[in-house]
Amino acid sequence: MFLLLNEYQLEILDFEIKIQEILPALETARMIYQSPEDIENMVRSLGSTTLNSLQYNTDYKPSKIQVQVPSLVPRMPSQFTLHRRLDIIRSGDVLITSIDSGDYLQDCKLSGEPWDIAVIPGENKAVATLPSLSLIEFIDINTMTASSKHSIPGGGLGVAIVNDKICVCGYQEPGIINIFNKQGKFINSLKVPDVAGYIMYLHPGPGDSVYYTDIHYRAVGCTTLEGEQRFRYTSTDLIGPNAVITDKTGNLYVACKDSNNIQRITPNGEFLDMILNTENDIYDPTDILFSKDYRKLFALNHVKNNTYIIVFLCSYR
């Protein structure tokens, strides 16, 4: 109820302003009876009436709306419960599944084998990287058809959308992020400071920044698109970091392929905990994703020639 009142508060205030504008124009009717002046005329006529209009006077006082909405503090998931497994039997295409049920919907044929994909916010478009062809390729997500292709200087792997810019990490030179506009036009290449290894995956960070994983030097970092390093976390336990994502609180989740686990890191780049491992059927994870409501976590496993998705239910305390 509180949320509903808060949502319509501006509309209620608008109605009150309109009422105050209408009130001065309102009139009230008064009927006046005029009796005959003498008895003789009273026999012939009962008298007459006149109708006068007077301005309507009212003491209207607008109500004071005070709505208290309980503050909703973002929380991080406290428990992950194995829900189901989804086997993937096709490769070389972009596979589309329902984020809620995990059921197969459709796929899209691309010009080559994709490495990563990102949806452009506010548009019905996505962009995929094709490392073997050194290309990015746009996808119409309504018709599930591939469209224009654009060359990546030095090739590319992971892709992320940061403030209407397409960021693609290069793999032919260490520490490079290639930046394109939303139409696929190349803008510039960014050399991430203090990165000697190859960047594998990207994820949008706060403001004009992007998170990255450095698989060769066991690192996760954050840099602005101007080249300012926010943090760089390294650990001997961070073995083979691949995809990185964030939850509602800003914590980072890293899929560590070679250590068969998913680790959680604070927004400042400090180790928090290990949330999933082989006991939860995590083997060679390369990608992870939260559902839109953050109630489910999807992990993509690659075990030899077997590729499948593990779905976890997220609990919050």
Image (tube, rainbow, N blue to C red):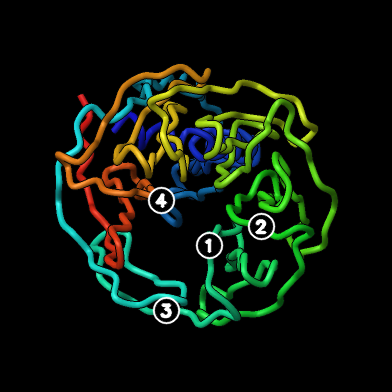
Q: Are marks 3 and 1 in contact (CB under 8 Å)?
A: no
Q: Residues within 10 Å of mark 1 (few under 14, many from 20)?
A: some
Alpha carbon distance from label 1 to label 2: 9 Å
Label 4: element kind: strand
Which residue is identified by label 3?
107
Q: Residue at x 42, y 78 (%)?
A: 107
Which residue is identified by label 4?
287
Q: Which numbered marker is on residue 156?
A: 2
Q: Residue at x 46, y 17 (%)?
A: 270
Residue 159 placement (x, y as % from top left): 60, 53
Which residue is identified by label 1?
115
Q: Which residue is nearer to you in this view: 28 or 233?
A: 233
Q: Residues within 10 Å of mark 2 (few under 14, many from 20)?
A: many
Label 2: element kind: loop
Alpha carbon distance from label 3 to label 1: 15 Å
Occupied quadrant, residue 257: top left
Q: Amino acid at mark 2?
A: Gly
Alpha carbon distance from label 1 to label 4: 11 Å
Q: Amino acid at mark 1?
A: Trp
Q: Which residue is nearer to you in this view: 25 or 124?
A: 124
Q: Residue at x 22, y 64 (%)?
A: 86
